[in-house]
Image (cartoon, rainbow, N blue to C red):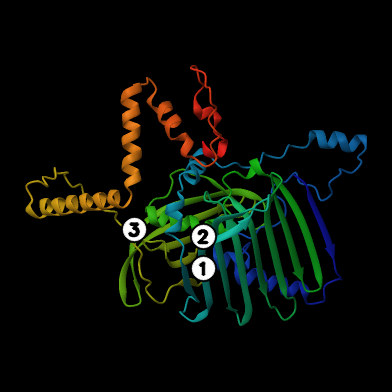
Amino acid sequence: MSSKVQSTGRKRAAGAGKGRAIFSLTIHPGAALEDYVLGTPVLSKSFSPRSAISSSPPHVGPRAKEHQASAPESPPPPEANAEAIHFLHSLRQEELQMLFFSETLAMVSNTGEPQGELTIDVQRGNHKDVSGDLLHCPLVHAYSKGFMDKTLCGNSLLGYLSWNLEIKEQHSQEFIKFHVLPMERKMSLLKQDGQLAVTRRIKEGEEVKTEVTFFPWHSVAGFISESANLLLLRVMALRRMVPSDARFLALDTEGKLCYSTYQALGSQTIQVDHQQVEVFIVEQTVHSEEGIPMSCQFYLLPDGHLAKRVQVGFPGCCMITKMPIVREEDEIEPRPAFEKKPLMWEEDMELYSRFLDRKEELRLSHTRYLQQHPEAKALVSDFLLFLLLRQPADVVTFAAEHFGPFAMSWPPTPGLRSSDRPSPFGLLEPEFV
């Protein structure tokens, strides 16, 4: 894995530090704006503490080498366990297609005041692979816009996934319009050449920082991206189960790879649009190695619709204001089996009458044709007469020799022919075979 960072810009204004303090305090200690809305950490930095800013290591002296040798080694990066990978491999295309729908939630404060709107749309999309072919895959699009402490903020997410929720391509953007220090973050993930390329661009005021990180594809097995997390929650709601002891991979608020777990908190009845509905509660926890764990609770309807979302320790939530039409899986009835009964058409007066009428119609048609073409009867009579006289062993060859001279392109018959003649089929041109 390699990482490259480039920072451009000028020094911050005198109030820049104050603007950053307001940002951290307003959202959550150690959490970003996208955590508030989508419930998934913002991708940033590299995934291993051993990543370097430069691709080539700097020169060090002997004492520095001794100091490095005595320093403790960095722990290995976390890996998803077998339960998580098995759960992702159990996903079926038909199952995911039932979860293709759009939903809108209102962002409200702890006092019930509206602060914005969140829309999540999952549909069937087309994505170009490395060879340029268009492949059908799930497409996740989420976006939100609102106010926090009278400050305009919002984000957007667009992700292409495989049918096992592996990331193909993802683009995300978030912003918060502070008066002193406006902030904007852009993130793109792309699978290419057996790697996951992550490009991150952070703009704070006039300072712009760009970072590119490459992850070996085998090291991110079981990784749940922001777009995959939204679809994975719908699968858990549809199945009404959470894989036990499953440890997935995610990125914490510092951009480091860590564990992500899901826990079922049971069922609960809540009120939605003057209706009492039962929801399945799933809690997702991102276990950061350096910071405190961050947990979000998702209240899900039986068909996967998100009824409510609460970030633990944060005032406010996202919830639906109108009860959606709950989708149910169609029950396919077994194909009826009909016993086959013999058709006794001779005993059926109507069928037997049709048979006699058709028989007479064909007899009259044949008789009429032979009367109009007497040469047909003469040809058949001559052939049968010669056949009975000669009584050849090969009737087909004899018939070909008999009717061959009637063909317009047939070669003339010689005056003297051998008694051991070859088959006339060998003399035919390919177009007559």
- Side (left or right) of 180 relative to 243: right
Give the residue number, with chain letter if any, for mark 2: 230
In front of the other: 298 or 404? 404
SS at badge 1: strand
Q: Are marks 3 and 1 in contact (CB under 8 Å)?
A: no
Q: Which secondary structure, mark 3?
A: loop
2 or 3: mark nearer the eye: 3
Residue 409, position as x, y percentages in the image? 55, 40
- Can you give x and y, in whole percent of width and height, for residue 193 in the image? 71, 45
CA gap, disc 1 and disc 2:
8 Å
Residue 217 in the image, given as x and y percentages of width and height: 66, 44
Q: In which quarter of the image is the N terminus?
A: top right
Nearest the viewer among 48 and 85 is: 85
Q: Which residue is pictured at 72% across the width and 81% down the height? A: 179
Marks 1 and 2 close (CB-CB < 8 Å): yes
Secondary structure of the residue carrying tag 2 is helix
The answer to whether residue 149 is left or right of residue 383 is right
* Residue on which disc 1 sits: 120
Q: Which residue type carries mark 2? A: Leu
* Circle 3 residue: 329
Where is residue 230? Give x, y as percent.
51, 60
For this orientation, the residue located farthest to the top is 420
